[in-house]
Amino acid sequence: MAYVTAEARQELLDAVASAAEQLGIALAELGEAYEHVDDFTGERLEGELFGPVQKAFGRAKRAHSAFAAAHDLSARAFPTPNPGHPSQGVKGFVESAVAACGRADATLVTLQDSMMLVEVGDADLRAGIAEVRRGLHEVPGRARLFLRTVGR
């Protein structure tokens, strides 16, 4: 199936933006979880979950903006989304964040599996996507361990 390179690049850029938006949601959820825990637990949350997700989010935004600039496309802004309702509690916020990370990762896996990334992407974008995925790799396991000890 033939497609116009500019349209394919825009689709690619939109997919990276979608993954970044999911990571922004995860950060908002983790930030809200932080507000509901004590200082010691908050430090753990920050080091084990928030930090890795924040790095992945930053890398996704950089990959998005660099690809947009390199191909004269419009980069998207990534405003901070609103977290869920406080009634979710810490467990709900962390689980929502992990789910958002999973959606971001699934989007990036789809890109890596597609020929579009090879055909119209560039080496920097491929490296950026791989780096984001590496950063997300341990988040679900870390979240499970974190949730086992919350409130103890």
Image (cartoon, rainbow, N blue to C red):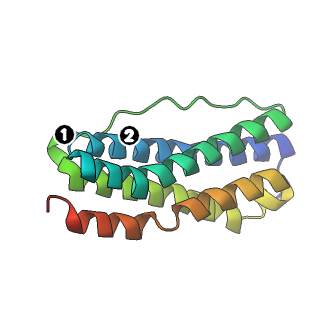
**Residue 148 sits in quarter:** bottom left
Residue 117: x and y in percent read: 77, 58
Where, quadrant-wise, is the C terminus in this rendering?
Answer: bottom left
Mark 1: which secondary structure? helix
Residue 121 seen in this snapshot: no
In-image side of 113 versus 85 (left or right) = right
| Residue occupying image coordinates x 19% and y 47% | 88
In-image side of 139 versus 113 (left or right) = left
- Image height check: is 109 above or below 9? below
Mark 2: which secondary structure? helix
| Residue occupying image coordinates x 35% and y 33% | 82
Q: Which residue is mark 1?
A: 86
Residue 7: x and y in percent read: 78, 42
Residue 59: x and y in percent read: 64, 47
Residue 78: x and y in percent read: 54, 32
Residue 30 seen in this snapshot: yes
- Image height check: is 87 above or below 125? above
Answer few, some or many: residues within 10 Å of disc 1's Cα (few below 14, many 20 plus, some between 14 and 19).
Answer: some
Disc on res. 28 = 2
